[in-house]
Amino acid sequence: MGLDDKIKNAAEKVAGKVKEGHGNATNDESLKAEGQADQSKADFKGAGENIKDAFKK
């Protein structure tokens, strides 16, 4: 995985945590769920990149 991809995934995960936290603070279930989805998407992308890297070796 390239450094650029790692940075983008980390930023997406952090943004998801912020959204989830804001959703918790304001009792906005929609925003909370969106934040959790963003985090899951970042995790999924990271796992995919790790798999690609494993096959390159």
Image (cartoon, helix red, strand yellow):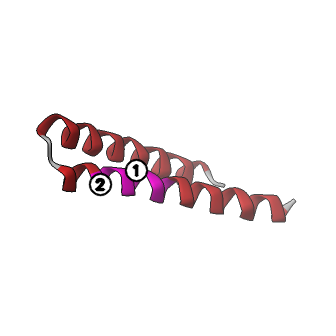
CA separation in Å, label 1 and label 2: 14 Å
Residue denoted by label 1? 12
Q: Which mark is residue 53?
A: none
Total numbered circles: 2
- Which quadrant is the N terminus positioned in? bottom right
**Rendering quarter of residue 51:** bottom right
Q: Secondary structure at mark 2?
A: helix
Residue 5 percent location from the top left of the image:
54, 54
Give the left or right position of residue 12, taking residue 23 as reference: right
Q: Secondary structure at mark 1?
A: helix
- Which quadrant is the C terminus positioned in? bottom right
Give the left or right position of residue 40, taking residue 21 as reference: right
Q: Around disc 1, counting alpha carbons within 10 Å, would you say few (fewer than 14), some (14 to 19), or many (20 or more)?
A: some
Residue 39 within the segment the image draws in magenta: yes
Residue at x-position 37% and y-position 51%: 36
Residue 11 percent location from the top left of the image:
41, 45
**Rendering quarter of residue 14:** top left
Q: Around disc 2, counting alpha carbons within 10 Å, would you say few (fewer than 14), some (14 to 19), or many (20 or more)?
A: some
Q: Are marks 1 and 2 in contact (CB under 8 Å)?
A: no
Q: Which residues are drawn in magenta? A: 33-42
Q: Residue furthest left?
A: 26
Residue at x-position 81% and y-position 58%: 54
Residue type beneath disc 2: Ala
Residue at x-position 15% and y-position 48%: 28
The disc, 1 or 2, on the residue closer to the chain's N-terminal end is 1
Give the left or right position of residue 19, taking residue 9 as reference: left
Q: Main secondary structure of the magenta part?
A: helix
Residue 23 within the segment the image draws in magenta: no
Q: Is residue 25 above or below residue 16?
A: above
Q: Which mark is residue 33?
A: 2
Residue type beneath disc 1: Glu
